[in-house]
């Protein structure tokens, strides 16, 4: 039985009899006071956390939506209806940032498949599997600023990556200066930095896998490909779902550091993401209301993509 | 089975290449950090002749990194302490105590988990500015606590759910108050989870860019990661010193990783396979 009595939470005040100063009565009054303190205890324990979450996370969400319908600058605080949203729709930078979100969603399966495949190999004990686990995971603990700085060196015009390309006879590539390429470069670096996270999650999923299923597959003479397709993937639906959702959230929310250090949104605005746009409009352009509108759009996009993903993955899971 | 073993070796090649690709960028950076400017310009790939510490010393002193380290350390220490205290209190109440509204409160905390910082950064900055907390240590600490508290509460709640109610009942019969149970039973029993979630919270806060950029605008309040980014402009024509600064900033996290890998992985995977 959990503590905290299931009896009524609020007892009428002063329910103890008055005037009686006998020992038993005093004891009873003490018990009543203690009982009240005990009943309030759960609320006292959760209060600080609830207060902080409500005031500094949920309330700002409401404020932001409200704020997105007001004007900036001279119009500060006056309602402008959908003005900010119309301005966003017309802004090529914001459109690029949304297009880049679409690109991220398209690249998502790759970002999930790489760690999934690697985890499968590690689980099947390729030579050296113990070492690989720690090696692959280590960039995941580095700050995006550090990763970005390191890759600014790596991707330099005469940096190591172009040296490797030069050795096989391919000319140097302007990884961060080519508007058609820069976004792919940044996403590539993000995947480099984070696939270890997803890998570890996959490995945790594998540890719950029923080994007898694998043995059965082996006895039946299943090939590696068949084992992965018919045994491993169906048993890991839950983990795959989790990785999909967390990887997408990671892509949509934690690339600011890389963008900040590596491209600052350039070249020609080609590496804008909504979060960078929001930060830029708020801090650099002094357009907080417009930034709020962009935030609201980002929130809606994330909700829609998230729900869509969960629905699709559920349906895929049910077919098996 | 020979086929499987062969497949294993075939997989081993790309895996080894990938492992190299994971390690090499850091090795390259460390190597550059040990070179003189002249060596770097002449040949950036050759191994540095000897370990040289003057680049590191220059980056440390010239860029005032000591200050950034102290700023980051103070903020992270307070934020993590608060997160663990509030997270374990709420986690205990939500998992072991029955009270009216508890499931609503748990849902509210979960909802907080699904509100990305990017979505609330404009109004949050405003709320902080209105309360006079912008550009102060308490402001940044509070922002970090708000950011990672839903996650911390969620993990502590699921950890405390695994503790049988009988333990709490026994402690109650022995005459403990609810607070006594928290302090004497739940806090000690929560240590493994507190360690995991604490390390993870510390890493998140230490590595953060966006929140500290917004909450601590003035240069003397910069956290380490913002400071490292500022190195870029300062040493744009002195790459070895820049690389040294990056290396210095990476070292604490790499040390933590070496010693506490398991706990970090536990934190990351919590909630991935069940619930």
Image (spheres, coloured by chain):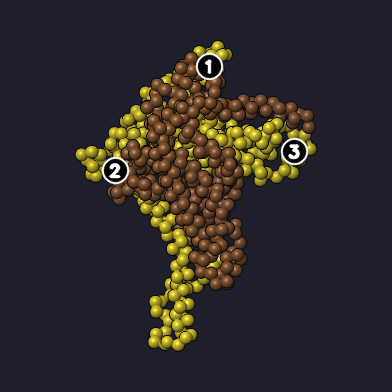
Chain colours: A yellow, B brown
Residue A162 position in % (x across, y down): 51, 17
Q: Circle 2 — which element?
A: loop
Vertical side of B8 occupied by B159: above or below: below
Q: Chain of mark 2?
A: A
The residue under label 1 is A163
Answer left or right for B6 relative to A154. right
Residue at mark 2: A69
Determine the CA span between mark 1 and mark 2. 51 Å
Query: Which secondary structure, mark 1?
Result: helix
Q: Residue A207 location in percent, x, y? A: 66, 44
Which of the pair A110/B194 is nearer the observer? B194
* Res A181 seen here: no
- Residues marked 1 and 3, same chain: yes
State the image quarter where residue A129 is shown: top right
Q: Nearer the viewer, mark 1 or mark 3?
A: 1
Protein chain holding label 1? A
Q: Which mark is residue A217?
A: 3
Q: Position of residue A140 (x, y in %)?
A: 53, 36
């Amino acid at each position: 039985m959990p503590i905290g009595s299931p009896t009524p939470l609020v007892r009428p005040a002063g329910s103890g009899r008055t005037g009686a100063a006998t020992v038993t009565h005093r004891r009873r009054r003490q018990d009543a006071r203690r009982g009240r303190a005990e009943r309030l205890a759960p609320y006292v324990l959760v209060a600080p956390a609830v207060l902080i979450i409500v005031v500094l996370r949920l309330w700002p969400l409401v404020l932001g939506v409200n704020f997105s319908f007001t004007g900036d600058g001279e119009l500060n605080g006056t309602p402008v209806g959908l003005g900010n949203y119309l301005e966003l729709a017309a802004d090529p930078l914001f459109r690029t940032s949304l297009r880049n979100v679409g690109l991220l969603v398209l690249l998502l399966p790759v970002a999930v498949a790489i760690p999934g495949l690697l985890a499968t190999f590690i689980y099947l004990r390729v030579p050296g599997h113990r070492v690989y686990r720690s090696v692959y995971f280590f960039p995941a603990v580095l700050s995006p600023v550090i990763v970005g700085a390191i890759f600014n060196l790596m991707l330099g015009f005469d940096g190591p990556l172009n040296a490797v390309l030069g050795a096989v006879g391919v000319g140097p590539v302007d990884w961060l200066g080519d508007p058609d390429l820069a976004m792919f470069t940044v996403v590539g670096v993000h995947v480099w930095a984070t696939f270890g996270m997803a890998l570890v999650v996959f490995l945790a999923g594998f540890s719950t896998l029923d080994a007898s299923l694998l043995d059965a597959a082996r006895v039946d003479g299943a090939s590696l490909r068949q084992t992965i397709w018919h045994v491993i993937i169906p048993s890991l639906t839950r983990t795959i779902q989790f990785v999909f959702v967390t990887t997408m959230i990671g892509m949509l929310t934690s690339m600011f550091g890389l963008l900040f250090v590596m491209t600052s949104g350039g070249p020609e605005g080609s590496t804008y993401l909504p979060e960078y746009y929001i930060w830029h409009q708020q801090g650099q352009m002094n357009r907080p209301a417009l930034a709020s509108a962009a935030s609201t759009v980002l929130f809606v996009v994330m909700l829609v993509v998230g729900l869509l993903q969960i629905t699709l993955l559920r349906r895929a899971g049910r077919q098996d | 089975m020979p086929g499987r073993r062969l497949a294993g070796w075939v997989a081993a090649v790309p895996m080894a290449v990938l492992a190299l690709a994971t390690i090499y960028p850091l090795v390259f950076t460390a190597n550059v950090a040990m070179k003189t400017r002249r060596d770097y310009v002449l040949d950036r790939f050759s191994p540095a002749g000897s370990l040289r510490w003057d680049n590191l010393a220059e980056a440390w002193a010239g860029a005032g990194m000591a200050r950034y380290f102290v700023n980051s350390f103070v903020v992270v220490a307070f934020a993590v302490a608060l997160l663990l205290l509030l997270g374990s209190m709420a986690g205990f109440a939500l998992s072991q105590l029955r009270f009216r509204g508890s499931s609503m409160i748990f849902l509210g905390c979960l909802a907080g988990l699904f509100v990305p910082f990017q979505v609330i950064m404009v109004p949050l900055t405003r709320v902080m500015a209105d309360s006079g907390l912008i550009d102060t240590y308490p402001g940044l600490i509070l922002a970090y606590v708000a950011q990672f508290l839903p996650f911390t509460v969620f993990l502590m709640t699921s950890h405390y759910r695994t503790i049988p109610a009988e333990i709490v009942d026994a402690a109650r019969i022995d005459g403990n108050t609810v607070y006594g149970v928290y302090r004497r039973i739940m806090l000690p029993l929560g240590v493994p989870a507190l360690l995991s979630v604490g390390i993870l919270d510390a890493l998140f806060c230490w590595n953060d860019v966006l929140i500290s950029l917004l909450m601590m605008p003035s240069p003397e309040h910069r956290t380490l990661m913002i400071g490292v980014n500022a190195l870029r402009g300062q040493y744009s024509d002195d790459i070895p010193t820049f690389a040294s600064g990056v290396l210095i900033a990476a070292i604490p996290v790499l040390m933590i990783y070496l010693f506490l890998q398991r706990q970090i992985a536990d934190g990351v995977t919590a909630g991935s396979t069940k619930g």
